[in-house]
Amino acid sequence: MNVHSQPPTTAEDRHEAILAAALELFVDRGFDGTSVPAVAQAAGVATGTIYRHFANKEALVNALYQRWKQRLMQALTDGFDPALPPRELFRDFWRRLSGFAAREPRALAFLELHHHQPYLDADSRALEQHSLAPIHALVQSAQRAGAVRDTPAEALMAMVWGAFVGLFKADRDGHLEISPTILDAIEESLWNAVKRPQGEQS
């Protein structure tokens, strides 16, 4: 496996080649199954070059995790309007999330495989918590407005995320072909699951 047809020639190119190769290998083989020499071979660089960019494999996986977590949050928050009604907020959030998954399926798979793993460092764990804070706040705001069930926000978030990841995993594994119609139907079903039933007291 080599993710580049030509060896990278500049330090920046080598850095990017290493991250691209690591993404592929960490998704396909997991953290324990990926060796630094394998990343170097896939990136088209010498093994020693890896250590000029990253102290060790743990530093590499954390750099990759932080890059893609930040890019996911950018996709979810750039231009996001928190003043939208809760129903429209949910739809917008879903479309942003599914758009990221369609554009970056390997990155989504990497983030799901590697979050909460013991090799993530304090910076990666802090970034994870920071990324959840605005979503948590939006859920609580919708609860105060009477639009969303009083179930703990963390549970509602886990339910939506779990359904989302399962949907795209089924597509990735060839069990389902995701279409706009399916995405809209699942989004509607999830909204019905989290919204406060009519007549229920807050």
Image (spheres, helix red, strand yellow):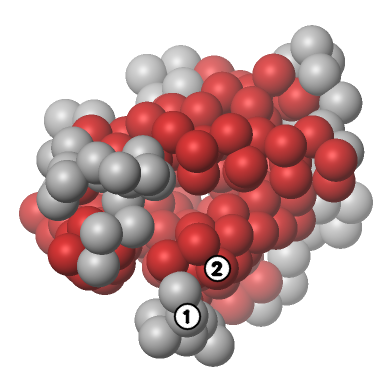
In the figure, residue 168 lies in which quadrant?
Answer: top right
Q: Is residue 76 left or right of residue 171?
A: left
- Label 1 environment density (alpha carbons within 10 Å; few <14, some 14–19, many ≥20): few
**Which residue is painted at 50% across and 62% down in the image?**
87
Q: Is residue 9 above or below residue 4?
A: below
Q: Is residue 139 above or below residue 110?
A: below
Kindly tell me whether residue 42 is visible in this rendering: no
Q: Residue 154 at x, y = what percent?
A: 20, 42
Query: What residue is shown with label 1?
Result: 84
Q: Nearer the viewer, residue 196 or 61?
A: 196
Q: Is residue 134 left or right of residue 28?
A: left
Q: Is residue 124 above or below residue 138?
A: above
Q: Secondary structure at mark 1?
A: loop
**Which residue is painted at 17% across and 46% down in the image?**
201
Query: What residue is shown with label 2?
Result: 88
Disc 1 residue type (three-letter)? Leu
Are the residues tagged 2 and 1 within 8 Å (C-beta)?
yes
